[in-house]
Image (spheres, rainbow, N blue to C red):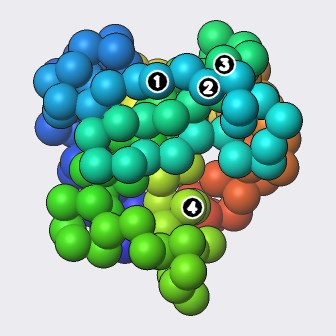
Amino acid sequence: MKIEEIKKVVQTINSSNIYELLKENNLNVVYSDILNNRKLDATLFENIILIKSNLTPEYEQFILYHELGHFLLHFQSEERYSFYLSKYKNRIENEANIFSFLCLTRDMDLTNTNIIELSVQLGIPSKIASKIYEYMLLSL
């Protein structure tokens, strides 16, 4: 999926409150202490986002937008969530990360902005921030 397609979906969002957006899309958040010791930060099952209970508020917001991105970009297009087993996992994860980043920065002018630095300021881990930057560069 091209970044322009992701931007079009982001433009359809009418709120900057992730919890309102989740409610509008009938997605429920369930916090899990069980995930706290696992590599996976969150996952989406039908209309439930299962998420670690010990994330920082900034990173939690990024993760929730990421899962909303999967729902809007992939789940509704019938790619479903067998993507974890597919060869497209990296692409799909990158698309959800870009979606999340664009939602978090939708009211910002990103011209001449250090994308990695801004991402880290938004609570996004530097490894993911670097991938966001790379994806955005490749999409130019």
Residues at marks 4 and 3 touching, judged by CB atoms closer than 8 Å? no
Mark 3 vs mark 1, CA separation in Å: 9 Å
Q: Residue 138, percent across and down?
A: 59, 72
Mark 1 vs mark 4, CA separation in Å: 24 Å
Give amino acid for label 2: Ser
Which residue is found at the position 40% from the left and 66% from the top? Answer: 81
Q: Which mark is residue 94?
A: 4
Mark 4 vs mark 3, CA separation in Å: 23 Å
Which residue in the structure is indicated by mark 3? 53
Q: Earlier in the sequence, mark 4 or mark 2?
A: 2
Mark 2 vs mark 3, CA separation in Å: 5 Å
> Residue 59 appears in which quarter of the rendering?
top right
Q: Earlier in the sequence, mark 1 or mark 4?
A: 1
Which residue in the structure is indicated by mark 1? 30
Which residue in the structure is indicated by mark 2? 32
Residues at marks 2 and 3 touching, judged by CB atoms closer than 8 Å? yes
Mark 2 vs mark 1, CA separation in Å: 6 Å
Give amino acid for label 1: Val
Q: Earlier in the sequence, mark 3 or mark 1?
A: 1
